[in-house]
Amino acid sequence: MLDVSRVQKELVECNRDESISGVSISLADGGTDLSHLRGTISGPVDTPYQGGTFVIDIRLTSGYPFEPPKMQFVTKVWHPNISSQNGAICLDILKDQWSPALTLKTALLSLQALLSAPAPDDPQDAVVAKQYLREYNTFLATARYWTEAFAKGSSSGIEEKVQKLVEMGFPENLVRSTLKMVGWEYIVYLDKLTYS
């Protein structure tokens, strides 16, 4: 059984100093389910992710906090330890190094630190890791481009895009899954909806 009071306490703690830490957590899809959350992290300064806001899907099992949260990047990101295809994350504290003493906030701060210090020798995305190790300047340019395209400005307004489509009458779950499938490209998505 999920420890609801702990999760509620963690949400308050995490959001208390969001302007300083650069991380926050809310209920996913504006719902009431404490086992499905949405985290956001600010791209760290002096990295190609600076200025971006990255959305993380967080799912808690009934074993939380004794089992790690399941986290996945919703925002596309070019990073050796994060899948460019599905947002899967390679980070030890989300696997065998998890401890009940850790919190959702420490997990999000660890993801933020991972953006600052990639570990290409233990990659989630071999293609990105290879580029990081062999063509570092190309890696930096690609990571900056992806941050601009997916985590900043109008294109990072994923929530705004979702809301607009929901207001048009499309179900939110369908909107999110299809937008993710087309790489959050709004126009492609509208074409898919319109012509399917």
Image (cartoon, rainbow, N blue to C red):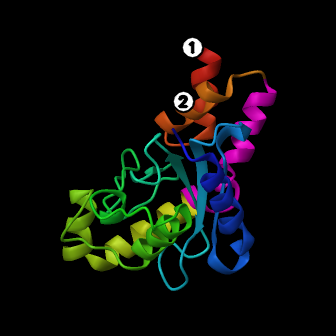
The verdict on residue 156 being magenta is: yes
Is 103 situated left or right of 186 in this image? Answer: left
The answer to which of 21 and 192 lies nearer the viewer is 21
Is 120 situated left or right of 179 in this image? Answer: left
The verdict on residue 180 being magenta is: no
Residue reaching furthest to the bottom: 46
Q: Which residue is mark 1?
A: 196
Image quadrant for the C terminus? top right
Residue 125 lies in quadrant:
bottom left
Please state the horizontal and vertical placement of residue 115, each as a whole percent of the image. Answer: 43, 72
* Above or below for 82 versus 173: below
Please state the horizontal and vertical placement of residue 6, each as a whole percent of the image. Answer: 61, 55
Is 171 situated left or right of 107 in this image? Answer: right
Residue at 61% over, 28% down: 173
Which amino acid does the dot numbered 1 rest on? Ser
Which amino acid does the dot numbered 2 rest on? Thr
Residue at 41% over, 50% down: 87
Q: Main secondary structure of the magenta part?
A: helix
Please state the horizontal and vertical placement of residue 162, each as a whole percent of the image. Answer: 69, 38
> Dot 2: within a 10 Å radius of its alpha carbon, few (fewer than 14), some, or many (20 or more) residues?
some
Q: Secondary structure at mark 1?
A: loop
Q: Which residues are magenta?
A: 150-168
Do the CB atoms of the residues marked 2 and 1 lie less than 8 Å apart?
no
Q: Which residue is mark 2?
A: 178
> Dot 1: within a 10 Å radius of its alpha carbon, few (fewer than 14), some, or many (20 or more) residues?
few
Among numbered discs 2 and 1, the one appearing first in the sequence: 2
Is 119 situated left or right of 159 in this image? Answer: left
The answer to which of 133 and 3 lies nearer the viewer is 3
* Above or below for 152 versus 176: below
The answer to which of 153 and 112 lies nearer the viewer is 112
- Whether residue 80 appears in this view of the structure is no
